[in-house]
Image (tube, coloured by chain):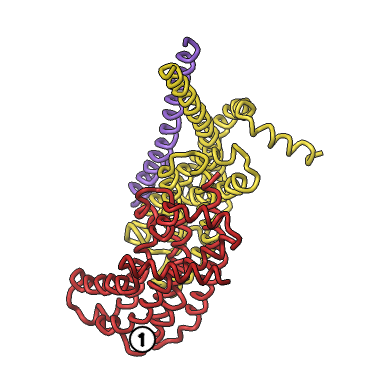
Chain colours: A purple, B yellow, C red
Amino acid sequence: MADLGPHGSYILASYVAAGVIVGWMILSSLLANRSAARRLAAMETREGQS
Amino acid sequence: METATKPSLWLRLANPAAFNTLANRLLWPLIIATVAAFAYGLYGAFMTSPADYQQGETVRIMYIHVPAAWLALFVYAGMSVSALGTLVFRHPMADVAQKAAAPLGAGFTLICLITGSFWGKPMWGTWWEWDARLTSVLILFLIYLGIIALWRAIDEPQRGARAVAILTLVGAVNLPIIKFSVDWWYTLHQPASVFRMGGPSIHKSMLTPLFAMGLAYLFLYLVLLILRMKTELMTRRLERLQIVAADKLAKSTGA
Amino acid sequence: MNALFAVIRREITLARRIGAGAELGIVFFLILISVVPFAIGADQKLIGRIAPAILWLAALLATLLGLDRLLQADEEDGIVDHLLLGDTPLMLVLAAKALAHWLVTGLPLSLVAPLLGLMLAIEPGAMLPLTISLLIGTPALTLIGLVGASLTVSLKRGGLLLSVLVLPLSIPTLIFGATVVKEAAAGRAYETPLMLLAGVSLIMLVIAPLAAAGALRFARN
């Protein structure tokens, strides 16, 4: 990787911040999807039994 | 030929099962495209693109900052189309898409603001400058937050969807006015020396990674949008099942 | 036409009955302006310099006050249902309600603003532009608020949400309105921002009743 010059820390920090937000968007979407799928599956098996 | 197939596709997509089939088919190719575009864009951003002769290496922040601003606007445009879909065409997928898109749009807007702040500190010497572009993006962020707040406040999905659709369209009409007024306000208070983000100093060698990052964000957005729409459909199905179950329970105990 | 006059007359009567008439709005305006020096300090020069901003911000907040009740009481009494079924177009009724709200908030504020401007050491030359800009600009604030009120009408505690929805949209009005006063105070021409302010108000006059009527109607089925 090239030398990022005197402001290297700002460049890295901005990429890290963007990465954190992107990661958060991915993670929250995935977790919400998983939990909805789990609850739906639980509901459907319960309804199937009764 | 196009016109004959298009409406039928739209009509078919109104069915959640058909939507899920299409979504599952699209999801993996989009994920691969996202990863590839990010890899190519980031490689270009750090390796092949030159440092700017004025801003030096700091210009590398542009590759995550400017595409985020594009996406912030693109998502809002998409939400406005969905809002029309909700109000005019009553397409059942429209409000699902809109609800799924709002937090993503806010996320990209936040990326734009934070990276802009990190870019501004070495360039302007302050974390925040009341620069016309940053200020407009900030207001867009506030409007996104308002839309999300309204979604949360109205618990009935259908009614909430229509209220949010109207708010989105009112916002869409207002955004150009806000943009114009902020630009106009900024020219009145122009600070002594202004560094322009993404001004005329963009090289051709910088454009390729810039567009690659734009595509990467776009693909990422589409992946997450599809995922969130699927989630929303499941949540709604769950709520319907719960109501049915509650009805059954009430009948059995009442009888 | 008579129906619209009846709406306006009813709104004003109601506002007076519950003590939310013009007087209370002016008192709120006065309090906001009296609080500012405590936050800033008794620096007459500084206060004079930011007076246009303070006056316009106070007008914005005073207009927001009471907006959440603009439609809520009628919603609770079932009057909105009546209006939806009535012969008079809902858009016009809502515009009349907005006009009535403006008559008890925006109009009196505009008229007393120069007096309060005196307290804030505003330039004498900016007095008239201040009143004119408020007269032209506060209708836009009320109309934007009408949209917010119609969107939050069914919510128990919509007041805070209403402000969150309405404030970003009122930024252009604030920019042009405050600039009129600032330019006038500096002795410069202020026609351009005044025209732009009038433009914003006219656009809102077209959009807001339409959007508010849509919001109320769509909230039903």
Q: Quadrant of residue B27?
A: top right
For label 1, count other residues whose C-alpha is less than 10 Å away and answer few (under 14), some (14-19) or many (20+): many
Numbered circles on residues, count: 1
Q: Is residue A45 above or below residue B42?
A: above
Of residues A1 and A32, the one drawn nearer to the viewer in this rendering: A32
Of residues B166 and B177, the one drawn nearer to the viewer in this rendering: B166
Disc 1 residue type (three-letter): Met
Quadrant containing the N terminus of chain C is bottom right
Q: Position of residue C39 (x, y in %)?
A: 20, 68
* Residue closest to the far top: A49
Quadrant containing the C terminus of chain C is top right
Of residues B220 and B247, the one drawn nearer to the viewer in this rendering: B247
Q: Is residue B31 above or below residue C72?
A: above
Q: Viewed as shown, does residue C44 lie left or right of C1?
A: left
Q: Position of residue B210 (x, y in %)?
A: 54, 47
At 62% across and 45% down in the image, what residue appears? B85
Q: Position of residue B53 (x, y in %)?
A: 46, 58
At 38% across and 46% down in the image, what residue appears? A14
> SS of the residue at dot 1?
helix
Residue corresponding to mark 1: C127
Of residues C210 and C78, the one drawn nearer to the viewer in this rendering: C78
Kindly identify which chain the residue marked by label 1 belongs to: C
Q: Position of residue C176 (x, y in %)?
A: 45, 74
Residue B44 visible in the picture: no
Residue A25 visible in the picture: yes
Q: Viewed as shown, does residue B154 lie left or right of B6?
A: left
Q: Is residue C129 above or below residue C196?
A: below
At 34% across and 54% down in the image, what residue appears? C160
